[in-house]
Amino acid sequence: MREISLDRLRTLVAVTDRGSFADAARALHLAPPTVSLHIAELEDRIGAPLLIRKRGKVGPTSIGEVLVERARRLLADAEQALDDIQRQVEGLEGRARLGASTGVIAHLLPQALEVLREHHPAIDIQIAVLTSQETLSRLVDGTLDVGLIALPQPPVAGLVIKPWRRDPVMAFVPAHWRSPARATPEWLAAQPLILNDATTRLSRLTAEWFATGGHHPAPRIQLNYNDAIKSLVAAGYGAALLPHEATTPLPDRRIVMRPLRPALWRRLGIAHRAGYVERSTQHVLDVLWDLRLA
């Protein structure tokens, strides 16, 4: 079945409003034969006359009136759709889908969201809590636009992965413990530990850090939610190794932070699809990039 062109409907509305093929042609910047052809094609598609001449003026038939009414709504909807899309192209509004871990969402994203709300309030940021591998997979299949991921990562075809920031991993220790000024693998391996879930990059980093001293401690519990880990540290359940962003508030006074010896860093990257980047997504990337040294 042949579709009805919006151009043909626009011609029908113009002829009806002006009561003349010639006047409609001038308004639409078309040749009069083109206007006649548009109407003929519409009538052929509908299978009934749409216009009649009355006292030297062109007017719609009853069927034509119904089609003109529907055509006005379709044309208005199409115009609104184009306006909405143009605003997204210009970055005035739109949507960006972002994936990150709970730690990043809790302590780094709020700063970015505050800036975006102030400067780009019509951009809707949709956030998914994901592992780095899940984030990369969803970027590839097009269901995410931006990812904050743990580094290093192997190259992924079709994606741009850039280093974003690095934050020191610190020992979070119950304040009532007697702890050294710098926490070593030897000292921490002898303590009750609360570590990140084994599926996370941070878990692998800390396991490698302990292994440099020949230690392979078994944690009391493994979690993948840093605030819950800190709550357990505050309760005296054990010590934890967690990244500390410079802008993050100091922990509960029942917790002390100790730098590690040797030092350990959590590195993060920003990932997005290669090629054309929508303006709303670019605004998000720009704001996040400004946080790389925060």
Image (tube, grey):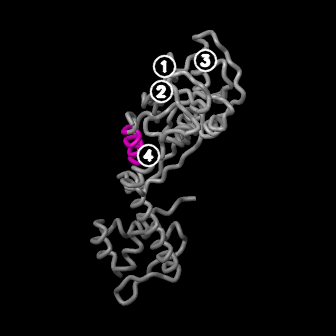
Are the residues tagged 3 and 4 within 8 Å (C-beta)? no
In the rendered structure, which amino acid carries the disc numbered 3? Answer: Trp
Residue 129: image location, x then y, percent: 59, 41
Mark 4 element type: helix
> Which residue carries the number 2 mark?
168
Crowd around label 3: few <14 · some 14–19 · many ≥20 (10 Å)? few
| Callout 2 amino acid | Pro
**Magenta segment boundaries in residue numbering:** 279-290
Q: Which residue is mark 3?
A: 187
Of labels 3 and 4, earlier in sequence is 4
Element under label 3?
helix
Neighbor class of circle 1 (other Cα within 10 Å; few <14, some 14-19, many 20+) is: few
The answer to the question of whether label 3 and label 2 lie on touching residues, with beta carbons closer than 8 A, is no
The answer to whether the residues at label 1 and label 2 have Cβ atoms under 8 Å apart is yes
Q: How far, Cα to Cα, is label 1 from label 2? A: 7 Å
Residue 133 placement: quadrant: top right
User: SS at mark 1?
Assistant: loop
Label 1 vs 2, first from the N-terminus: 2
Of the residues shown, which amino acid type is indicated by label 4?
Gln
